[in-house]
Image (cartoon, coloured by chain):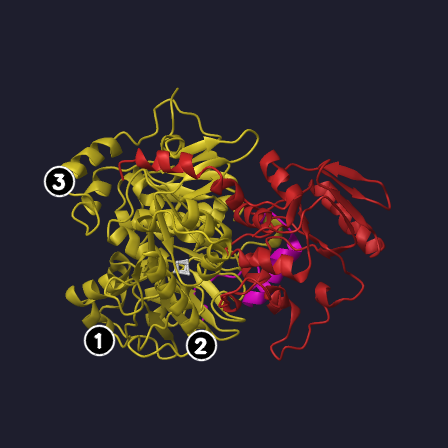
Amino acid sequence: MSKTLFDKVWDSHVVRQIEGGPDVFFIDRHFIHEVTSPVAFLGLKSRGLKVLYPERTFATADHNTPTINQHLPVEDPLSAKQLKALEDNSNEYGISHWGLGHQKNGIVHVVGPENGITFPGATIVCGDSHTSTHGAFGAIAFGIGTSEVEMVLSTQCIMQPKPKKMRINVNGQLGKGVTPKDVALYVIAQLSTSGATGYFVEYAGDVFENMTMEGRMTVCNLSIEMGARGGMIAPDETTFAYLKGKPLSLKGDAWDTAVAHWKTLKTDADSVFDKELTFAASDIEPMITYGTNPGMGMGISKNIPTAEAVEGGVATYKKSLDYMGYNENESMIGKKIDYVFLGSCTNGRIEDFRAFASIIKGKKKADHVTAWLVPGSHEVEALITEEGILDIIHEAGFVLRQPGCSACLAMNDDKVPAGKYAVSTSNRNFEGRQGPGSRTLLASPLVAAAAAVTGVVTDPRDLL
Amino acid sequence: MAYDKFNILTSTAVPLPLENVDTDQIIPARFLKATKREGFGDNLFRDWRYNNDDSPKESFVLNNPIYTGKILVGGKNFGSGSSREHAAWAVYDYGFRCVVSSFFADIFRNNCLNVGVLPVQVSAEFSELIFNAIYDDPKTEIEVNLENQTITILSTGAQESFEINSYKKENMLNGFDDIDYLQNIKGDIETFANGLLL
Ligand code: SF4
């Protein structure tokens, strides 16, 4: 029987099928961080359990870490306590730990691929919903809750019903200034935030085939924002080239054997999906969101839709626009913004900083704008310096911060004040996501850069 | 965590007819810093429930003494967004044992089942019936019968059946969780792992 990429990876990780129940699903790689793991370890202890395969779990501190003065003790006592718990638990159970200050430290979904922990055909979980990022490598990767973290620690398995399958095809050539982030925001706007609930998505078509690994990561990262369990892209030469020689990638004969296997990880020609959607690359513009969920996005040159034109409840829609301080039918272009956030596991990689630099080069940051430029990892930070991007950043009047999740979820001090507008390259624009009362406009690094230098929402194509 | 057994729950219900209630609203990120599982109920829907000076917002349903009970009735696409299990803990810790919606986000539904909160998905029509019944009479009792997989508005007798997979159902009826199950098949898991390339 013909199988999809998803079937191939899923079926090869089922330890046992339960009649009328979920599959016992084996996990190859498990990432943990300081926020969702302490309670899981507490659970282990109270049941007197061990970690079954500590070598399959990787710990990094990222969610609540400060992005300045990382050499100093963490001021917030609760954050410090979580960081300490992660370190102590990792040490106690023999888990490798890249804590604050470690040269490999960074956002979990940035450091995983960067170090070759992620690989094609793997099953990967983490107590963070954007674990779907790793699907860019042809892995099945998704976010789990803390109870499941405890399950993976103690048995390397979770209980999962097999999701339905969806394929999203995007074909054609992307226009000038249109990035992988825009492709993802476009698809989410088409499907809504629940359009893919219950599904696991495969992205196919020449747009994804021609994308770099970093672009693919951005797209897969955002799969969760349309409700999908995760998203994946078939591994190809781009994937192998990216992984080859990474610190924890296989070497020598083992690498060759693995690549030969990875090449079989493709959807068979006559496979059937539960749902299939196709979009044209030429329809996609640089995107921006105007509301309080990632599905409320539109091409930057469009006007905010009327309540009648969108699916779902009118009351919810109006509440959302009220929160944002926007009205139906308005254009977003020219709207004043206060903050810019470049970073997160969605857009905190070197290509994102290159894109940002391409716009700000030779210009100046708008005076009233506060900008947080936060690399996804120390490795990204090092590349920024090495490639001369740091000089461009400084000349334009910006500063570079230290790696972490930062304003993506604003658990540390990087909080956007109430009522202020932030153009953010992260993944969620929920009420208060970037600080109580904050208003978030999600966009690509190009749109963020254009806003940072003009101080208002600006079409980046005008500056390229 | 093993939790209380769930069989038949009869209770009044709290209506929250908003769509796309995301887990950042259920429990904002700044309250995720605890290293224990208890106490999250105090911050359930924090920013909708309290003003900046911590005084209760009177317009929010949890601050309205007319509406109480162990059942929370939400709008469509309840629990979307972040995977934080803390959202399900907060719902449980506050005292809810069941959430009703015409559509649940996947991870939230899973998390609920793991911590002893029963997610009951009903049709849009039935969801309307429940909201109307509660607004007509806040003392309306709803009966959720897990064994029979039915939800009934007791005042009108309106009933609908709901889906739950038989494995999760057994677990909830007995107060077991997945870890109990997995511990019992560790031998199989080790055999499986030994056969892997990576
Ligand atoms: S950057 Fe944001 S989405 Fe990514 S891992 Fe950190 S908190 Fe989660």
Residue B22 on the magenta segment: no
Task: Give the crowd class for mark 2: few <14, some 14-19, many >=20 residues within 10 Å.
Answer: few
User: Colour in which chain A is shown?
Assistant: yellow
Q: Residue at x 40, y 79 (%)?
A: A75
Residue A322 on the magenta segment: yes
* Disc 1 secondary structure class: helix
Ligand 1 shows up in which quadrant of the image? bottom left
Q: What residue did someone put label 2 on? A: A77
> A172 or B150, which lies in front?
B150
Q: What residue did someone put label 1 on? A: A395
Q: Is residue A34 above or below residue B57?
A: above
Q: Quadrant of the N terminus of chain A?
A: top left
Foreground mark, 1 or 3? 3
Q: Is residue A454 above or below residue B111?
A: below
Q: What residue did someone put label 3 on? A: A252
Chain shaded red: B
Residue B186, x across and y down, in percent: 43, 39
Give the residues drawn in magenta, as a range. Answer: A310-336
